Image (cartoon, rainbow, N blue to C red):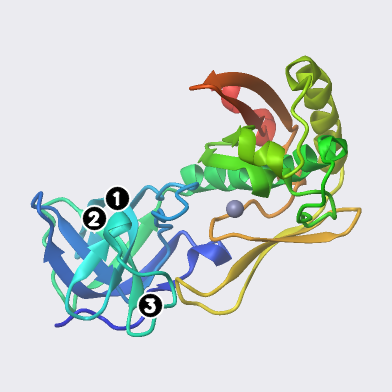
Amino acid sequence: MTLPLSDTLVTYPAGDVTGAATVLHVETLADGRHAVLLDTTCVHPVDAGWPDQGPDRASVRVGDADYPVVDCIVGATDGSALFVGRDIPVGKGTDGWAFVAVHVLNADAPIGEGDSVELIVDAGYRERLSAGHTACHLASLALNRAVADRWKKEVRLDALGFPDFDGTAIDVSLIIENGSVDTYRLGKSLRKKGFVTEGIAEALPALEAAISATLAEWATTDAAVQIERDGERLTDRRSWVCALPEQTVRIPCGGTHAESVAALGQLRVALSLADVEGTPVLTMETFASPNGRGTDEL
Ligand SMILES: [Zn+2]
């Protein structure tokens, strides 16, 4: 069978953690492992362009035996070759290209094109990443609000109408179990856009308290969280939609999420400032505590 020229259908945005699939293509990677393409998947793949949420932990059932999915990465094909992760030479939506979830299996997995398989995702790990991802979006909105008075020029606004510090200054966003770690560069280009960095080191405790207070307020509501999507394909546009008391907010997002803000338990953040080769870098760690358990207590 040749490489499929349609995007993988994805069911993880709807919260699926199991599902049947048909193997469309198998090829051997340079390290001997298998790259497996399926018609549909419930396994969340990591995106090389914006790798904030890592791959699900999962296994593939072939016949009566389960084989671990050791990695799951977004790939792309023009029908003649498969490109994985950073090797993808084109942007999403390029004509003639399909974007696919590449399931990586060890060399000993007996899998072949045309096989019917079952996918089983580690539901607990998914749930903790989903809680972390929702907490990350909420914390970014609370951070934007807390530093809103530090802008002296107009910048784009976030989903709540505050200057979008998060979207403007973000360097790396990493979703972890029940939390996230986001880093922001407070360098020359941000200051040129009108962000005042003077005195921010001294202001950290007050900012931390303001963000945590906003989060605590949201945590007491039972605001619903949903993922809206234009279609079932890997590349179809998806948005995180959260019904906050102020207003319903939408943020473009390809990840997985908790079903409500209340499911996150208590939320808080820790801010720190470091100097990275002359550029001040702000780090915000966000902690959720679904079921009363926080990442810091694991
Ligand atoms: Zn997101």
Question: Image check: 114 left or right of 256?
Answer: left
Q: Residue at x 76, y 56 (%)?
A: 156
Question: Image check: 57 left or right of 150?
Answer: left
Q: Secondary structure at mark 3?
A: loop
- Most extreme residue toward the top is 202
* Residue highlighted by disc 1: 71
Percent from the top left, x then y, of residue 142? 79, 40
Q: Are marks 3 and 2 in contact (CB under 8 Å)?
A: no
Q: Residues within 10 Å of mark 3 (few under 14, many from 20)?
A: many
User: Between 156 and 139, which is closer to the camera in this rendering?
Assistant: 156
**Sequence-wise first label, 1 or 3:** 3
Percent from the top left, x then y, of residue 197? 74, 28
* Residue highlighted by disc 2: 104
In which quadrant of the rendered view does residue 145 lie? top right
What whole-number distance in Å separates the C-alpha atoms at marks 1 and 2?
5 Å
**Sequence-wise first label, 1 or 2:** 1
Q: Secondary structure at mark 1?
A: strand
What whole-number distance in Å separates the C-alpha atoms at marks 3 and 2?
17 Å
Q: Residue at x 19, y 74 (%)?
A: 25
Q: Are marks 1 and 2 in contact (CB under 8 Å)?
A: yes
User: Between 89 and 113, which is closer to the camera in this rendering?
Assistant: 89
Q: Which mark is residue 7?
A: 3
**Which residue type carries mark 2?**
Val
**Sequence-wise first label, 3 or 2:** 3
User: Between 138 and 145, which is closer to the camera in this rendering?
Assistant: 145
